[in-house]
Structures are given as C-alpha cells and as structure tokens.
Image (cartoon, helix red, strand yellow):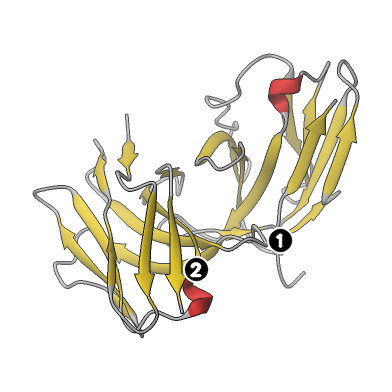
C-alpha cells in the first residue's frame, strides 16, 4: 500500500523568505511519480511541481524546487522568495505511473506574513 | 472543454436523501478520479475509471456510494441515503496518462443537514 505523510500541519514564512515543506512516502511501486499540489481558499487544486522517481535530478519550476531523496523516501518542497499569493494548503502526492492513481498526504497550510 | 467541470458547486441535502454529483472531464482524458476532502483534511481516494477497464472502486467507503462513467466521458457519483458524515468537498480529476498528474475540477461542497 502507498502512504504519504506530511508532518507539518501548519507553516509560516515571511514574505520574500524561503520555506521548506516536508513529505515522506512509502510505495511498493517500482515506477512512480511524486507531486506537489497547491490548494488556495478557492479550493481549486493546482499542480505546482512534478518529479519522476527514476530521475535523480531535482525538479524546479521558477521559485519552486524539490529535494528528492529516493533512498530516504523523502520529497520536500522549497519555496523561494515567498509571495502573499503562495498562501495555501499544499499537498504532497505519490502516484503509480501505471494507473496514474495518486495518494495524497494530509496537507500543510502555509501562511505568508507581509 | 478547457477544464474539468463539476456540478453543482454546492449542494445542501437532508439526511436520508440521495444526491448525484456530476463531473465532466477534459476531452480526450481517458482516466477519471473521484476524491473526497473533509474539512481541512487531505484527499481520500474514492474511485478511478480508466478507459474501458473495470473501475477501481477500492476507496468507496460504503455501498451507499456508487459511480458510473458513461461513454468514457461524463461521470456521476451517487450517494444514497446521505448521512451527516458524508458532508465534504467531492473533487473530480482527469488525466491523459499515468505520471503526468491530474487536472482537478473545483469540486462540489456537499452539506448534509
């Protein structure tokens, strides 16, 4: 069975500073993907970043980057130069490349202070 | 359509009534997923459709929950004899192939009173 754990229910960061959200996962899949999704108060889920597990290079998308440690089954999200619009709930997810089915963590609520 | 469309956006129903929630995925997306999100919580997998294959119903919490997907496109999630614990946001998502993540709809907030 797949599990995804986000151990930080809430985090806060000062505007323009950097914050890291933690995620660990467990999967029996040999070929899988990892994702971070953002859910603002509008409740629309938005894909932030995607990592292919077979790739060692960490994914980056503008101010968002991940630290993927495959052996440790860790997949943290770093947000640089935090902006007020980054305030949201962030979900880590692990998915099978075969079925595409995603298992989500419990989420981390990020507050950005002006 | 351009995105995943869900209707209604909000639904209030009386305990014991049946409800139907609709999801219209992105055209051409072969996979469709339903999740449930209770207040402030994570996403709980409910059911998954992939093309013409038998759906993965492993996440449905009880036999009061069922879903179908007609013509490989629109899906309907039905909850019979609703209970207060069914109150949640029901999210639908679709994808083209595994590994590329989902496109989500904006969800249906169900309130059972």
To the question of a shared chain for discs 2 and 1, the answer is no
Q: Using the image, name the chain to which the residue with label 1 belongs.
A: B
Residue A105 at what x, y percent from top left? 40, 43
Work out which quarter of the rendered image holds the N terminus of chain A and state it.
Answer: top left
Q: Which residue appears farthest toward the left when viewing the image?
A: A71
Residue B76 position, x and y percent, is: 79, 39
Task: Report which residue position mark 1 lands on.
Answer: B4
Q: Which residue is mark 2?
A: A87
In the rendered structure, the answer to whether residue A102 lies left or right of residue A27 reads right
Above or below residue A72? Residue B1 is: below
Using the image, tell me which numbered label, if any, was put on residue B101: none
* Chain designation of label 2: A
Say which of B43 and A57 sits in front.
B43
Residue sitting nearer the eye, B84 or A105: B84
Tell me the mark number nearer the camera, choosing from 2 and 1: 2
Give above or below for B80 relative to A103: above
**Category of crowding for the residue at label 1, using alpha-carbon neighbours closer than 10 angstroms: few (below 14), some (14–19), many (at least 20):** many
The quarter of the picture where residue B66 lies is top right
Residue A7, by quadrant, is: top left
Tag count: 2
| Residue at the (45%, 64%) spot, across then down | A111
């Amino acid at each position: 069975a797949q599990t995804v754990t986000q151990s930080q229910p809430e985090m806060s960061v000062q505007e323009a500073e950097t914050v890291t959200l933690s995620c660990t996962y467990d999967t029996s899949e040999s070929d899988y993907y990892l994702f971070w999704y953002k859910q603002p108060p509008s409740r629309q889920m938005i894909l932030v970043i995607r990592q292919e597990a077979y790739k060692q290079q960490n994914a980056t998308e503008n101010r968002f980057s991940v630290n993927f440690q495959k052996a440790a089954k860790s997949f943290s999200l770093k947000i640089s130069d935090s902006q007020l619009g980054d305030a949201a709930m962030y979900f880590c997810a692990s998915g099978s490349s075969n079925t595409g089915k995603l298992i989500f963590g419990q989420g981390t609520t990020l507050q950005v202070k002006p | 359509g351009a995105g995943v469309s869900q209707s209604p956006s909000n639904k209030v129903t009386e305990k014991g009534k049946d409800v139907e929630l609709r999801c219209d995925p992105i055209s051409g997306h072969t996979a469709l997923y339903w999740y449930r999100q209770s207040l402030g919580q994570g996403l709980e997998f409910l059911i998954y459709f992939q093309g013409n294959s038998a759906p993965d119903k492993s996440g449905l919490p009880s036999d009061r929950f069922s879903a179908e997907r007609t013509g490989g496109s629109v899906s309907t999630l039905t909850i019979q004899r609703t209970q207060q614990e069914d109150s949640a946001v029901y999210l639908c998502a679709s994808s083209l192939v595994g590994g590329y993540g989902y496109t989500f709809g904006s969800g249906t907030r169900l309130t059972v009173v």
